[in-house]
Image: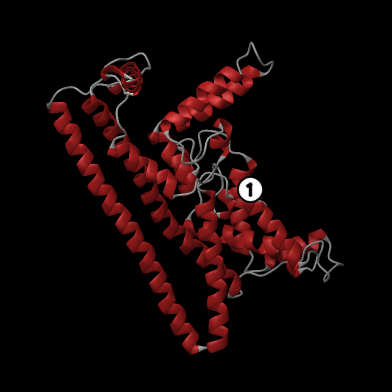
Amino acid sequence: MMNRIWILCVLFCSLLPSEATAKKLPEASSTLLRMHRLYQQQPPHDRTLYDTLDVAPNATSAQITRSYRKMSRRYHPDKVSDGEEKLQVVRKAYDILKEDATRLPYHQYGLTEISDVAFLLTGARSPKTLSANQEQLLRLTGYVSGQSLSYEDRILFLAANLLERIRPLVEDTISPSDLTDSIAQECVVLKKLPLGAQILRCIGRAYRRAGQQVLRQERFKLAGEVTNTLQKYKHMTKHILEAAAVGGKLIVTEKINTRKSISGAEGAPRIEYHFHEEDEEFDDNAVKEVEKDKASKAELESLQIEALWKISKIHLDRAINDACKQVLEGKYFFFPSDLSSYRKDWTKAEMARYLREDKQSKPLLDVLGRHRLSF
């Protein structure tokens, strides 16, 4: 009987973690848990990199690293003929997802490079060649890659884009359902681009609101005009308050981080901790301090992107509203094209003379000629 009890005690003790094992891994800090909740609460803007590593969008850093190592072994060039190419794709995904500083902007906005924010939201010249889809997204916001448009030219460009987009419907060369399906398919592709979902949502709401204002004013006359004015100021106030709130939060976060960096510089030097499985001991406080610093920097960059987007959103909403007003108030109208059911007997020379002589089309033609734009 005593022998059995002794054996059970030995087995029970062997299952308990030893002191060395207990010190093997740090417990999940509050910083890690807080960052993990960000990925749990918000759906990803794009899942491509997560799917590349075969992990869930709310995967922990340990799960991402484990999956990367597994795929590195699976696609080793000695095992797979095209393993080098697949490894490059996997390695690129891992480089972005392994750190919160790069993972958080990708998760929230689909950004793989922070520098992309500047030309996507301000129309600045891009240092790299844009894809056709990125060019199309810029055109929807009134920008052209490599071109510097004034606000007035941007309005004319947006108005012309709007006219040409719905021209087939006016000329009865496409059914409303087919045009809707075509635009929906285009949006499915564009919303996966960095900041694409945010930009398309803002554009769609601006167009819908402009149409509602015209219908309201047409139906209710003076009462509709008053309502439109109130709605306009309400909407603008909401955007300004949102931008101010994010800006204030950004300023406070920057000051807190600055104070921490100053106090850290005056005190003991910070250490970078890289955990390896063979390490036996670690400084738990140092690890948590490094995690906190990295999380603070990641959140600060995310706030900077959000603040820039909130400000750009105000300008984009205003530009689309002004462009819609140009069209809906009749300042610009449809010029007959080769597909028009009227004025079929016009030659190209007569059409060109008509456009040159028409006073309303002259500003639009000036913009097209000055910036060499086509639709």
Is residue 374 shown left or right of residue 247? right
Rendered image quadrant of residue 18: top left
List x then y, in percent, for residue 206.
52, 65
Name the residue carrying label 1: 189
Q: Secondary structure at mark 1?
A: helix
Please name whichever residue, 99 or 124, is drawn nearer the observer in this view of the structure: 99
Q: Residue at x 59, y 55 (%)?
A: 367
Query: Which image quarter is the C terminus in?
Result: bottom right
Q: Say which amino acid is labelled 1.
A: Val
Rendered image quadrant of residue 164: bottom right
List x then y, in percent, for residue 57.
50, 41
Please name whichever residue, 166 or 341, is drawn nearer the observer in this view of the structure: 166
Please name whichever residue, 252 or 68, is drawn nearer the observer in this view of the structure: 68
315 lies above or below 82: below
218 lies above or below 241: below
Q: Residue at x 57, y 17 (%)?
A: 73
177 lies above or below 55: below
Please name whichever residue, 345 or 74, is drawn nearer the observer in this view of the structure: 74
